Image (spheres, rainbow, N blue to C red):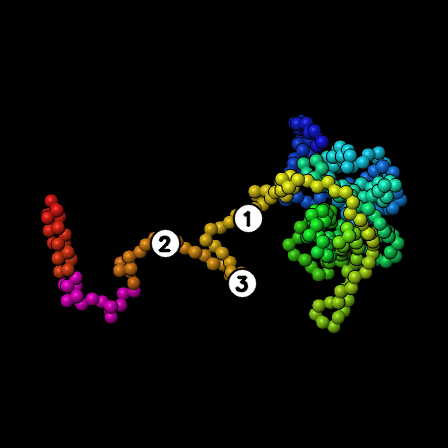
Amino acid sequence: MPVLQRIKKPTTRKGKKVLLSKEPKPIEGPKQSIFLQGRNPSERTRKLLKDIYDLKKPDAAYLSRKNDFVPFEDSSLIEKLCYKKEAALFGVGSHSKKRPHNIVLGRTFDYGILDMIELGAEEYKAMSEFHNIKVLAGSKPCLLFNGPAWELNQDLKRLKSLFSDFFHREKVETIRLQGLEHVLSFTATDDGLIYFRSYRISLKKSGQRTPRVELEEIGPSIDFKLRRTKLASDDLYKEACKIPREMKPIKKKNISRDAFGTKHGRIHMGKQDINRLQTRKMKGLKKTTEEKKKILLQKKKDKKAAKQKQHVEV
């Protein structure tokens, strides 16, 4: 059940500021996340959550206290902690004989559970076991999703969206080549295995304008096994992905762009009499006196014929 929220009226200026900061905004910043321990966590799950927390810093909180609960049976504690910490993402580590080295990753919407996906850590190599230079904390990584299974399987499609939410950070318009120094690779196989790898980008001299790119693994290295899932319904997921009205682009009528980016506009005009259009006055096009007399005689004949017609009708 979602957390019951009481209507609070601020009594101070600071309280009003806090409540305003919790309200939904058209442009959200990086999503906050919390990592906590479930029932009987193993040493592997603790280290694994700590490594994911290090990759997510500073937009994350790590709670080392043990909690005796199972997320798929009772998620009220997660909803309560997410509301308290203002977090939209969470990770829970646990261990049992039936599900060893268990990791549950999920996200919330309106402080209620939206998606939960259970993963098993089949193989794991901690970040501390890679003795090399690491990347700076808070750097935006480049996410690579390898394999066609990410688009063919519905569970993996949601897991791809969940990983993107975890490591997306802030939205950027332009990218500087020297600013790319971290790559997270996710490779999905047909038998439900997901290979999670982390690399540091090194730019070497190539003798040309573009540098030679080398990848150095910095950890963690995890082989996940897809287990249980608890996904949101299509209607709830559509509501969670709804774009605010303020962020929707205003469509301008009768304006389009071609393949080269050139703007084209269409103008609608009323019906015009070509004979009455004012053109450039030229002596060569000027009417002679005889032509003017013929036009006047023709107009008089037309008027006379119109009067006779009216007289006959009466």
Left or right: where 311 falls relative to 144: left
The image quarter containing residue 64 is top right
Q: Bin the neighbour count of mark 2 within 10 Å (Cα to Cα): few under 14, some 14-19, many 20 and up.
A: few
Q: As rendered, which of 4 and 141 lies closer to the eye?
A: 4
**Residue 249: image tag:** 1
The magenta stretch spans residue 84: no
Q: Position of residue 22 (x, y in %)?
A: 68, 36
Residue at screen point 41% across, 55% down: 267
Query: Separation of disc 2 and disc 3 at Cα?
Result: 27 Å
Q: CA distance from mark 1 to mark 3?
A: 21 Å
Three-letter residue code for mark 2:
Met
Q: What's the residue type where badge 3 is placed?
A: Phe
Element type where label 3 sits in the image: loop
| Residue that carries the numbered disc 3 in the rendered image | 260
* Rendering coords of residue 274 (x, y %): 29, 59
Specify the principal SS of the magenta part.
helix
Image coordinates for residue 208, horizontal then vertical, percent: 72, 71
Vertical relation: 238 (above or below) 176: above
From the viewer's side, name the closer residue of 201 and 38: 38
Asked if residue 14 shows in the view, the reply is: no
Q: Give, as a single range, the part of the protein colored magenta.
A: 280-295
Q: Residue at x 39, y 53 (%)?
A: 268
Disc 2 to disc 1, C-alpha distance = 27 Å
Mark 1 / mark 3, whichever is N-terminal: 1
> Counting other residues with Cα less than 10 Å from the Cα at mark 1, is it few (<14), some (14-19), or many (20 or more)?
few
Label 2 SS: loop
| Residue 49 location, quadrant | top right
Q: Mark on residue 269?
A: 2
